[in-house]
Image (cartoon, helix red, strand yellow):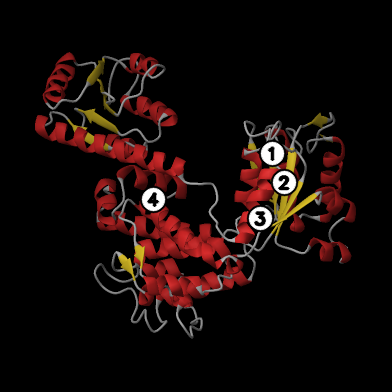
Amino acid sequence: MKSIWVVDDDHSIRFVLEKALAREGLPVRSFSNARDMLAALDDDVPQVLVSDIRMPGGSGLELLAKVKARLPALPVIIMTAYSDLDSAVSAFQGGAFEYLPKPFDLPRAVELIRRAQEESQREAGEQEAAAQVPEMLGQAPAMQDVFRAIGRLSQSNVTVMITGESGSGKELVARALHKHSPRGDGPFVAINTAAIPKDLLESELFGHERGAFTGAQASRRGRFEQADGGTLFLDEIGDMPFELQTRLLRVLSDGQFYRVGGHSPLRSNVRVIAATHQNLEERVRQGVFREDLFHRLNVIRLRLPPLRERREDVPALARHFLQRSATELGVEPKRLSDAALAQLTHFDFPGNVRQLENICHWLSVMAPGQVVESKDLPDELQPGHAPAPTTGMSPTQLAVASPAGAPASTSTSSGEGWLADMAADARARLLAGEADVWDVLTRRLEARLILTALDVTRGRRIEAAQKLGIGRNTITRKIQELGLDV
């Protein structure tokens, strides 16, 4: 069992906590300063860290930042005799598990450490489970063909072109090709050429020198340099601006390029994997994609089937996504009834695997029971569904517009209200060919849920996490990932 580490310059505090935790059968290791504790991390890792906020030679908040940089999942409890608002806010913003004012009730402190220990064990279990999840799922013959192709290419550095509809999992294939190649220990760098403005894409790919353009205050390595010795994944290559295609062709030909504003040639040993949902032969005929670049990229073509061509994989994928969403949210995973599963399986999924993942995440949040019935599925899966007109509010705004305990819409089963608006918004984005529809809508929903919970709890993160049914570390991580100003 890993130890509980206590850092405090007050010997009496360390002594009291050591004895109390020892009576509970919990191993303890104590330090009088942050420096010694950080040095100990080179040889050991605690299960929970309890630290004073003000100590000679370094504050607990500075220690918190350094520890979180190395061990982001480690629960850290901050103690202080100075119970001021700024300290509490700083502790939680830094990712603290809890804030413990001195003098504290000893049984309460031990109970808090116990909860932190349980959180640490749960996080470790989630990481282990995530590590055991296979890279890709699929028993359908079309997917088995993809797996065999990945296997045949495993010892090759040949350029690969992955084709397939949006949301079918092209980046997963690229990552698998990289992982099982001789470059597997090198970096995997991905860039969506359709998601970056034309004026910035050249700098993103090749880097720039200081002063190359307005705002270039320092030199910057591009993706080709970052991927040296590894793999560069160029997603949506069909949307690359024509003038940049010439520069890309030269790099693929001789491995040499210049940074924007640079005068010295650079070389990078990179394997390129490209992907597109477009018909590149047609793009070549239209004169918007270079034929020589097409042939340079199209050495090996790997087609990824849409989900409607591998319906037998829907049940396994749905179970996987429901489990993953439940883990992220800190709740029990939902189960699909036979009728609901049959309805899912017969759906055409224009957004492919990404759409199924989105639906499973939505069900984890919105389905009323542990067993998902057909009537609980989103409106776009219901027979005869037609998109409802959207209102002036976004779907995620509508999701929280109703007061606590009140229904979010007047009739979810009839296709009205915020659920229909969300479906219509998603459908419009998918049909428009937008990238990252899942990420955009999920981030909006998560952000609105968290902000609403924090409003209800008047900013208390621990209580907000409990009300949402997620872990304390999860809400802190989400706040940081989403860039919420709270």
Q: Is residue 41 above or below residue 148?
A: above
Q: Which residue is mark 3?
A: 145
Badge 1: few (under 14), some or many (20 or more) residues near its Cα, within 10 Å?
A: many
Total numbered labels? 4
| Res 213 seen here | no
- Which amino acid type is marked by label 1? Thr
* Quarter of the N terminus within the rendering: top left
As drawn, the label of residue 273 is 2
Q: Earlier in the sequence, mark 2 or mark 3?
A: 3
- Look at the image and tell me whether residue 159 can be seen: yes
Which residue lies under the disc numbered 1?
231
Above or below, 244 relative to 411 = above
Q: Which mark is residue 354?
A: none
Disc 2 from disc 3: Cα separation = 18 Å
**Is label 2 in contact with label 1 (beta carbons under 8 Å)?**
yes
N-term mark: 2 or 1: 1
Q: Earlier in the sequence, mark 3 or mark 1?
A: 3
Secondary structure beneath disc 2? strand
Q: Are marks 4 and 2 in contact (CB under 8 Å)?
A: no
Identify residue for label 4: 328
Question: Which numbered mark, 2 or 3, is in the foreground of this view?
Answer: 3
Crowd class of label 3 (few under 14; some 14 to 19; many from 20; radius 10 Å): some
Q: Which one is earlier in the sequence, the residue at label 1 or at label 4?
A: 1
First reached walking from the N terminus: tag 4 or tag 2: 2
What amino acid is at disc 4?
Answer: Glu
> Gap between marks 1 and 4, in whole Å?
29 Å
